[in-house]
């Protein structure tokens, strides 16, 4: 069986363990130690190869950034993790998967919380976070992705948001069921059924959006494609901020209009004086 483990999977395992620790009202140090131990068990279960260790490291940093909200400390952890992984395996320096993991984690650290905070007060925090996390990762990974494959996935963001509630059951319940299969197969059937149904929904949603018209638009190749995607990411961030702050945008537009009117009036006055 082939498994693809990402930082998101590791973040879900860590997040589930942290929530369990909070429910049990464990001290923070003990909760952290238990979550890291659980992540270690998960890594051993799926196979501690280089990609899994990288995903576990990036997932832990991403979750710590979202939970603690301390951007400077999270950036320090990310720098230490990158340096350590490169020392252990210098070939990661030319590994595209490693680069995308770093960029996705960096995007979550720098942009996820600010973007989530832009949402109106009536939007539930879990919904704003579900939107902000994949967007933050996509904004930084986009320029690299189009350099590898010059196409623009139009519905990638909305697909990630829609499937987000179903990814957690696949990862968490699938992990719970795995050690139960050889010991208590009848008990493992329940989490496996839920995880399997959730995986089917994820696949169905992915096929649906992939089949829509314009789901993969052509994009310029090479440096031109990378630069235009970088500019598009910046423009997208600005448009999202404007959509979430209509009053400030309206006020800025009115103020700019007033300045332009004053500038035009001053120019006309100067012209009249010059003619006189």
Image (cartoon, rainbow, N blue to C red):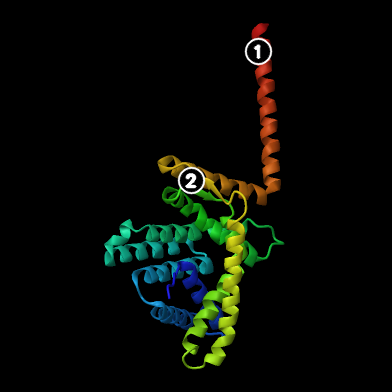
Q: CA distance from mark 1 to mark 2?
A: 43 Å
Residue, x 48% and y 51% (percent of image)?
A: 142
Q: Which mark is residue 271?
A: 1
Residue, x 67% and y 65% (percent of image)?
A: 124
Q: Is residue 121 left or right of residue 115?
A: right
What kind of element bears circle 2? helix
Where 239 falls versus 208 (above or below)? above
What kind of element bears circle 1? helix
Of the two numbered discs 1 and 2 on the same chain, state the one appearing first in sequence. Answer: 2
Q: For the N terminus, give its image quadrant.
A: bottom left
Estimate the x, y position of residue 274 in percent, counting from the top left. 64, 9
| Relative depth, front residue between 77 and 169 | 169
Q: Residues within 10 Å of mark 2 (few under 14, many from 20)?
A: some
Where 151 falls versus 48 (above or below)? above
Among the 4 quarters of the image, the one containing residue 157? bottom right
Estimate the x, y position of residue 135 in percent, counting from the top left. 55, 56
Estimate the x, y position of residue 121 in percent, counting from the top left. 70, 60
| Relative depth, front residue between 245 and 204 | 204
Q: Residues within 10 Å of mark 1 (few under 14, many from 20)?
A: few
Q: Is residue 247 left or right of residue 32?
A: right
State the residue position of label 2: 230
Estimate the x, y position of residue 33 in percent, counting from the top left. 44, 81
Q: Nearer the viewer, mark 1 or mark 2?
A: 2
Residue, x 41% and y 41% (percent of image)?
A: 223
Query: What is the count of numbered marks?
Result: 2
Residue, x 35% and y 62% (percent of image)?
A: 82
Of all residues, the one furthest to the bottom in this rendering is 183
């Amino acid at each position: 069986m082939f498994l693809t483990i990402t930082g998101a999977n590791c973040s879900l395992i860590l997040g589930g363990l942290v929530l369990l620790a909070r429910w049990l009202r464990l001290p923070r140090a003990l909760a952290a130690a238990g979550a890291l131990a659980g992540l270690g068990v998960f890594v051993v279960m799926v196979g501690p190869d280089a990609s899994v260790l990288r995903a576990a490291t990036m997932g832990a940093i991403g979750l710590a950034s979202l939970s603690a909200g301390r951007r400077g400390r999270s950036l320090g952890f990310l720098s230490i993790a990158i340096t350590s992984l490169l020392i252990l395996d210098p070939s990661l320096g030319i590994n595209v998967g490693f680069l995308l993991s770093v960029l996705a984690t960096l995007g979550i650290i720098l942009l996820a919380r600010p973007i989530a905070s832009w949402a109106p007060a009536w939007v539930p925090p879990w919904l704003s976070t579900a939107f902000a996390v994949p967007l933050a990762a996509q904004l930084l990974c986009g320029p690299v992705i189009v350099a590898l494959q010059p196409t623009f996935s139009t519905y990638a963001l909305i697909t990630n948001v829609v499937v987000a509630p179903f990814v957690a059951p696949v990862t968490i319940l699938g992990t719970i069921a795995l050690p139960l299969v050889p010991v208590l197969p009848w008990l493992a059937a329940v989490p496996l059924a839920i995880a399997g149904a959730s995986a089917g929904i994820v696949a169905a949603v992915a096929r649906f959006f992939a089949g829509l018209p314009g789901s993969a638009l052509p994009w310029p190749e090479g440096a031109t494609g990378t630069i235009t995607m970088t500019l598009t990411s910046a423009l997208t961030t600005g448009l999202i901020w404007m959509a979430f702050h209509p009053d400030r945008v309206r006020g800025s537009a009115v103020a700019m209009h007033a300045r332009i009117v004053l500038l035009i009036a001053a120019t006309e006055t100067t012209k009249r004086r010059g003619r006189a």
